[in-house]
Image (cartoon, helix red, strand yellow):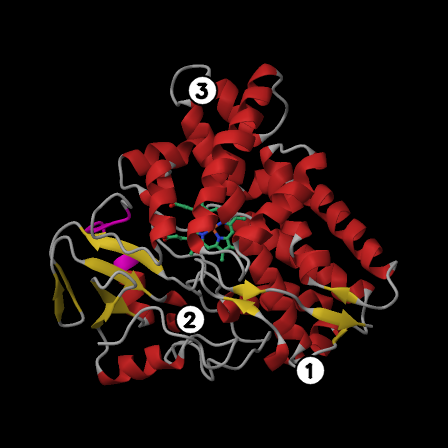
Amino acid sequence: MHKFPLPRIHPMDPPQQYREAEVQCPIHKVEQWNGKQAWFFTRYDDIRSLLTNPRTSADASHPNYPAQNAALAIVRKDYQVFAQMDPPEHTSERRLVAGDFSVQRIELMRPKIQALVDRRIEAILSKPKKADLIADFAGPVPCGVICTLLGVPETDHSLIQSWAREISSLNTSSETAAVMIKDFCDNYLTNLVRKKNAAPEDDLLSRLIVQQMRTGHISELKVVSLARLFLTAGHESSSDTLGLGLAALLYNQDQLALLRDNPALIKGAVEEILRYTDVTHSGRLRTAREDIEIGGVTVRKDDAIIMHQPTANRDPALFPNPNQFDICRPPRPHLTFGTGIHSCIGQPLARMELQIAIGSLIQRIPTLRPTQALEALHFHHRLAIYGLESLPVTW
Ligand code: HEM
């Protein structure tokens, strides 16, 4: 039995050992950080089938729910949100915010996102031909986008960004991160919700407060918990996908040139970036509500389940030459946003911001190139989201 998680061999590929273990025994168990066992799935078809199976549970308060570290388990318990709930609670809570994430609603944000991206590119261009694409671009852009959606005042965007950066930094222990998240929820976010309650505006948090909190449908703690969910789920995942996606392009200059010369390829390029980078590397986590027969094994009621969808996104049965980064790959549905009832609510927003950010950066700075070898870059790998610490470039 191997442990989970295992370290990567190549920074842009999921740990090779997961595939090797799958070849020997397609469905097996792994040992988690706390010594407990979990069923481990890496095949595309198995994961698709489990993610849409109502016999699985996403309830993070289950004693066997897998967690990649103790700190995250505490945070999830204190600020419960629909991401870790089952129907019917999941259905009704997700419905409260689904309208704000619809394709039509998100489309209205396009001009604001474009303006935000343009400002960042101008700032990069004002520098003496040297920038860090994480600190100068991939960090601030998604932070600005999610803050705009929620209604976080612009003066606080950099505070939110440095908070998020510190939490996911290599130098922050997971215990410190948990304390920081709690402090942020109990102080900054609670104050923000109170300010919005006093003077609501046209944003997601104000709508939740006016329509749901004031009418007694949800508590202040729930609004704070949802704000935390969106700020973390919608920020780090997009930020790290943007950073790694830019790295994938910069370290595959043929693909970068292809996209630069054919801007219409941006949609396919972003789908390939999502498949190839798949930053939620702790996998999809569940327990079994009842016995589940799958692929010749029986997952017993209450057993822990880890589905490693980054490995499934490299399944050669679906994606020929899976470790090759190819922006012209024929479209096939990847699992980067999950699937089923918990599939990512923010995917229209993530897609749009990635398309605008990457498309605009490449057109405005066509000679962009990295200044360090890929092997010299630092990646953060301990928390739920995988990503780059910095990406130095010149042009
Ligand atoms: C590239 C960026 C993103 C990636 C890779 C990503 C990935 C995912 C994945 C894999 C899930 C499924 C979780 C599961 O099945 O257990 C998910 C759910 C979720 N995502 Fe995203 N996400 C991204 C961007 C966003 C954005 C921009 C938001 C906006 C707030 C967001 C909010 C959420 C929420 C609230 C859920 C929970 C949905 C539910 O349980 O019903 N995500 N995301």
Nearest to N terminus: mark 3 or mark 2: 3
Secondary structure at badge 2 equals loop
Q: Residues within 10 Å of mark 2 (few under 14, many from 20)?
A: many
The type of residue carrying mark 3 is Met
The type of residue carrying mark 1 is Asp
Q: What distance separates the C-alpha of mark 2 from that of mark 1?
A: 22 Å
Nearest to N terminus: mark 2 or mark 1: 1
Query: Which residue matches tag 2?
Result: 313
Q: Position of residue 134 (x, y in %)?
A: 67, 61
Left or right: residue 51 versus residue 218 is left
Question: Which quarter of the picture shows residue 49?
Answer: bottom left
- Magenta span: 50-58
Q: Position of residue 392 (x, y in %)?
A: 72, 70
Secondary structure at badge 1 equals helix
Nearest to N terminus: mark 1 or mark 3: 3
Q: Are marks 1 and 3 in contact (CB under 8 Å)?
A: no
Quarter of the C terminus within the rendering: bottom right
Query: Which label sits on residue 254?
Result: 1
Any part of residue 390 in sight: yes
Residue at x 53%, y 47% (from the top left corner)? 234
Q: Position of residue 356 (x, y in %)?
A: 69, 55
Residue at x 32%, y 40% (from the top left corner)? 77
Residue at x 60%, y 29% (from the top left corner)? 203
The type of residue carrying mark 2 is Asn
Is 44 placed above or below 239 here? below
Query: Which residue matches tag 3?
Result: 213
**Camera-nearest label, 1 or 3:** 3
Any part of residue 52 in sight: no
